[in-house]
Image: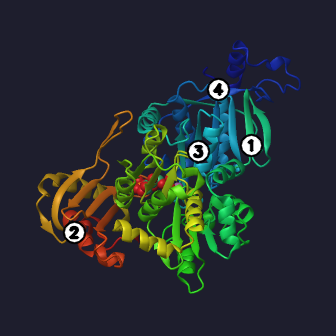
Amino acid sequence: MSILCQTTARQENQAAGLLRIATLPGHRGYGSVIHYRGFLVIQTVSTTPFNDQKPGTSGLRKKVKIFQQPRYAENFIQSVFDSLDGFAGQTLVLGGDGRYLNREVIQIAMKMAAANGFGRVLVGQGGILSTPAASNLIRKAGAFGGLVLSASHNPGGPDEDFGIKYNVSNGGPAPEKVTDAIHARTLEIDSYRIIDAPDVDLDSIGISQLGDMTVEVVDPVALYAELMESLFDFPAIKALIAGGFTLSFDSMSAVTGPYATEIFEKRLGAPAGTVQNGTPLPDFGHHHPDPNLVHAKQLYDRMMASDAPDFGAASDGDGDRNLIIGRHSYVTPSDSLAVLAANAHLAPGYAAGLKGIARSMPTSGAADRVAEKLGIPLYETPTGWKFFGNLLDAGMATICGEESAGTGSDHVREKDGIWAVLLWLNILAVRKQSVVDIMAEHWATYGRNYYARHDYEAIAKDKADALMAALRDKLTTLPGMVNSGGTIKAADDFAYTDPTDQSVSKNQGVRVLFEDGSRVVMRLSGTGTEGATLRVYIERYMGVDGDLGLETGDALAPLIAAAQEVADIAGYTGMDKPSVIT
Ligand code: VG1
Ligand code: CO
């Protein structure tokens, strides 16, 4: 149906038997849009492609100003719909992290979903759904898929970032073959469909009608909190807290505020004030909602103070990441994954044990040692949660994680910040030890993977590309070379073959592997919106007989020097040190 003006719209709709304008009560005449439930005009609007709509590691992320261009969001959403088959009459889940532009794009997406033939939209109240809650809702509702509006850990506000990600029916991010199809479509699109209708009231829970499509505004928290309660021993955690165990959770003025308040304060009885920065703000209070030691400094300082709580945690913009800090003890995300995997059986939802563990390639090998000890497989995937979906669906892995503070399990198909915190709390409630002691025991059992990520942000894109190209060019010459890191054993550009469908993903990051098991990995970020970000991942393994109490910076110093020698980072970037170390 191609409808470019009201009259044509009316005629075409009449022809299709969809609309009987003349017979509608209260009809306001030709040329005006008809706003009757079930009788809304579907417009087909001409458009031209934008050439910058390639989804990155996790959906399309751009500056708000770019998304505010006329037809920009519409083009991308229509390209998503055009790349899918068989959704007529089906359910679409919609929600976002509440950042600037969230509400506007939700209204557009609902009207486009109605015009494209979805039967029902489930949208979080206020347009809010954390990424893991959206994943859960897609699964529980048997939805066809969902649009998650977020730029995750990127800042929000009129001059900051926005994003749109499509998730498939298993609740997880669309796999590469779908994102590739979406991208191809964005380059050819010539029209999008939307109905002309008043905005839906997003703030009241309830059901309304948008054309032939039903809109259900749902409580964004309830179903998710129920899922958490089904996985973890809430009475044990409640007893731990009642016994004087103290915790602090920083929502960073982002989406997890309502979730954390309901779960930690209401259901688990932690005192009011346990959740800090608990009101989601469109600009995250001008903060960068990335739960790392730089941006969650407030929490870090609290956890290092003499009167620190026993346990501290934070989450990111859309609620899928977690930062874990014990009293005076920061836990690297890679170590956290290993500890959670080693102890998961202590929580009721995982009492039967794990089927396997999956980690992204740059994540440290700490989890590998746990998998080995448990006698279960370990999968190494490219960066980004979309690669875990197939393994989880196939029952090959139960727990997954990334060095970037993402951990999750087969309970949904996204990483899940609050889930990770609850699993930690469940473990602490059972083991009755401090985080420091748990870490010390873990390293004494498995050895320690000293680990850090160095980010060089906002580099000119051509410089970053040149650095990676030069590195790739010399891969074959590196083995056998000796530098500050020792002797290089192997070097390659990581490629992954999905064991479930044999799909291949190439160029996923350069690995330089040393003879003693240490490694340096380099890749360019796929989530940034300004220039390029080089990520350098540095890892050194120390066996149980080695020194397990070194400062991370000291332990990694030779490898940091080696990274510079191999890639001439300072030469290409003009930066003599990284902008962020995590
Ligand atoms: C980063 C992280 C990656 C994570 C991705 C999305 O990607 O490194 O591990 O999956 O962000 O996380 P990149 O391409 O910038 O390195 V989130 O919480 O921003 O959805
Ligand atoms: Co996130």
**Which of the marked residues, 1 or 4, is nearer the chain's N terminus?**
4
The quadrant of the picture occupied by the N terminus is: top right
**Which of the marked residues, 1 or 2, is nearer the chain's N terminus?**
1
Q: Nearer the viewer, residue 256 or 413?
A: 413
Location of residue 365 by image quarter: bottom left
**Spatial separation of the CA atoms under disc 4 and disc 2:** 56 Å
Which class describes the residues within 10 Å of circle 2: few (<14), some (14-19), or many (20+)?
A: many
Q: In the rendered view, tell whether residue 308 sits above or below residue 9.
A: below
Which class describes the residues within 10 Å of circle 1: few (<14), some (14-19), or many (20+)?
A: many
**Which of the marked residues, 3 or 4, is nearer the chain's N terminus?**
4
Amino acid carrying mark 2 in the image: Ala
Instruction: Residue 453: tell me if it is visible.
Output: no
User: Which residue sits at x=68%, y=53%?
Assistant: 225
Q: Nearer the viewer, residue 464 or 540?
A: 540
Amino acid carrying mark 1 in the image: Val
Which residue matches tag 2?
562
Which residue matches tag 3?
135
Helix, strand or loop at mark 3: helix
Which residue matches tag 4?
117
Which class describes the residues within 10 Å of circle 3: few (<14), some (14-19), or many (20+)?
A: many
Q: Position of residue 423 (x, y in %)?
A: 56, 60
User: Which residue sits at x=43%, y=33%?
Assistant: 181
Q: Position of residue 72 (x, y in %)?
A: 54, 42
Instruction: Tell me the mark number nearer the camera, choosing from 1 and 4.
Output: 1
**Spatial separation of the CA atoms under disc 1 and disc 2:** 54 Å
Q: In the rendered view, tell whether residue 143 sits above or below residue 480.
A: above
**Which of the marked residues, 3 or 1, is nearer the chain's N terminus?**
3
Which class describes the residues within 10 Å of circle 4: few (<14), some (14-19), or many (20+)?
A: some
Amino acid carrying mark 3 in the image: Ser
